[in-house]
Image (cartoon, rainbow, N blue to C red):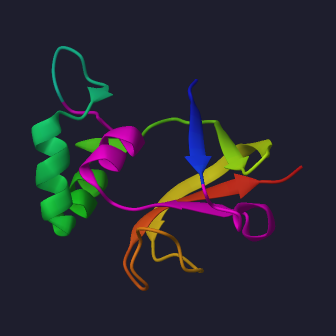
Amino acid sequence: METLAIYDQPHAEWLGEVYLPITPENMKLMLMRTNDHPTPEHELSDFDALRITERPWMLFQWLDVGFAAFKPYEKCQVYLGDRIRIYDIEDIEINAPKVKVKDVDEGIECFVVHLRYW
């Protein structure tokens, strides 16, 4: 399994969450197609990523009907200045961030990665 790398989110240690804005690049990073034949699971195309980003309702529809799913990341590597922490991923969802995050407007939904502490 791949490890998700996150930068510049110092709140991750105490909040237990990291955030990624919904952009075409992050769409490809976080989602995979699950309905195409003959290779049912593969990366979103650039066209799909742009199309879903421009139509937020489409993102929820694709997740609901199974056209797309979150990539099966198990670990999240968080870069905190001079420190690096690796966490297990508990869950990934789409929601508004709890704190102000660079590149995510307040109250706007984004990818939320919940980190598990042991």
Residue at 22% from the left image edge and 52% from the top image edge: 62
Q: How many marks?
A: 0
Q: Is residue 90 left or right of residue 102?
A: right
- In the displayed orientation, state which residue is furthest to the bottom: 107
What is the quadrant of residue 104 in the picture? bottom left
Is 14 above or below relative to 79?
below
In front of the other: 51 or 9 = 9
Outermost residue on the top side: it is 38
Residue at 24% in and 58% down: 59
Name above or below for residue 59 compared with residue 57.
above
Q: Position of residue 82 (x, y in %)?
A: 79, 46
From the viewer's perspective, is residue 26 above or below residue 113? above
Q: Nearer the viewer, residue 46 or 101?
A: 101
- Provide the residue span drawn in magenta: 8-35
In the image, is residue 19 part of the stretch drawn in magenta? Answer: yes
Residue appearing at x 30%, y 53% in the figure: 63
Kindly indicate the quadrant of the structure image that contains residue 17: bottom right
Residue furthest out toward the front: 82
74 within the magenta span: no
User: Could you say where residue 64 lies in the image, as x and y percent from the top left?
Assistant: 29, 57
Q: x%, y% of residue 111?
A: 45, 60
Q: Residue 76, image x and y in percent?
A: 65, 42
**Which residue is at 39% across, 62% downward?**
21
Q: In the image, is 26 to the left or to the right of 100?
A: left
